[in-house]
Amino acid sequence: MNPIRFGWARTVTIAAAFFMLAMTGCASSPLDSQSGGSASLDSAINGSQRSDKARARDVYRHPKETLQFFDIGPSQAVLEIAPGGGWYTDILAPYLHGSGQLYEAQYLSTSADLAAEDDATDAAYRRKLADAPAVYGKVVVGALHAGQFMGFDANERFDRVFTFRNIHNWIKDGQVDANLRAFHGALKHGGELGVEEHRARPGTSVQQMIDSGYVTEAFVVEHAQAAGFVLVARSEINANAKDTKDYPHGVWSLPPTYEGGDVDRARFAAIGESDRMTLKFVKP
């Protein structure tokens, strides 16, 4: 997930796109016949809606183990924050299609970095959802900016809120605390916040976190607790001991980004994707 340029004209355009997605036909998912009207998690992960490129990352992202750690259930109301190209949307949408509900909040940043690339990612994401109503027709898409949700009522509505590899962007934007408070307000009491993030070494400064994309667990826990959350569990599902976290382009040196191009590409490919914390918080 990269920062996205924010502006009122763009917000109007996005809002119109969100409305069209919400109104897309709700044809039955081809997976509905399985597991009593809702695809099993295995069926969702192995479904034809996922590309070969997406599946190739399962070895690093461990979607089944991660979602099970986050106590996912097929009848839940789930909010995913900043879905990017929809890597997890491709799993969550069919899994929740039968008796659950998936909401997506695109993140609107104050930063202009990589704006054209992010606009293209957003457009591709909206096209994907609109082009496959059998899989994505029930997905509700809105936005998040500076701790405020747009496009749907989020007040104590959700059983789960998930965010994957986004905290570093919010630190850069100065929005991390506002966003965490928004997630707290969006969850029902007893609901859970699941966080996956690139993990920095203890003692890494805030500026180093911004520059490298790696964030300390202590930072995430401290700020989540300040927003009202209680940490209930940590998991090493997405740990990677090969990740030395000292690359010229930060975490973006590693796959899938390879920001350095062909320079040391084989070495970075052998390391794999980043070492990541996987944390589970609850709203009391």
Image (cartoon, rainbow, N blue to C red):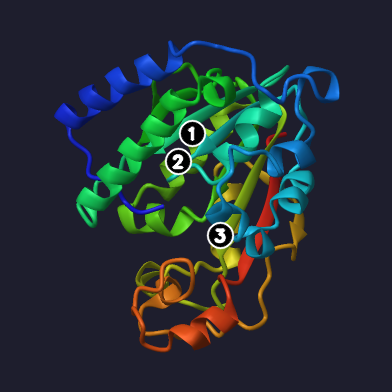
Residue with the mark numbered 3 = 197
Residue with the mark numbered 1 = 182
Residue 282 in view, yes or no: no
Q: Nearer the viewer, residue 174 or 100?
A: 100
Q: How many marks?
A: 3
In the rendered image, which quarter is residue 205 located in? bottom left
Mark 1 or mark 3, which is nearer the start of the sequence?
Answer: 1
Residue with the mark numbered 2 = 179
Q: CA distance from mark 2 to mark 1?
A: 5 Å
Mark 1 burial class by Cα count in 10 Å: few <14, some 14-19, many 20+ = many
- Judge from the rendering whether residue 178 lies leftward or rightward of residue 280; answer left or right: left
The reply to whether the C-beta atoms of the residues labelled 3 and 2 are less than 8 Å apart is: no
Mark 2 burial class by Cα count in 10 Å: few <14, some 14-19, many 20+ = many
In the rendered image, which quarter is residue 210 located in? bottom left
> Which quarter of the rendered picture does the C terminus lie within?
top right
Describe the element under mark 2 as helix, strand or loop: helix
Residue 121 in view, yes or no: yes
The reply to whether the C-beta atoms of the residues labelled 2 and 1 are less than 8 Å apart is: yes
> Which dot, 3 or 1, sits closer to the camera?
3
Q: Residue at x 64, y 65 (%)?
A: 60
Q: Nearer the viewer, residue 72 or 177?
A: 72
Describe the element under mark 3 as helix, strand or loop: strand
Q: CA distance from mark 3 to mark 2?
A: 15 Å
Q: Residue at x 38, y 31 (%)?
A: 126
> Given the image, on which type of amino acid does mark 3 rest?
Glu
> Given the image, on which type of amino acid does mark 1 rest?
Ala
In the rendered image, which quarter is residue 56 located in? bottom right
Residue 27 coordinates in the image, percent (x, y): 58, 12
Can you name the residue that lies furthest to the left here? 9
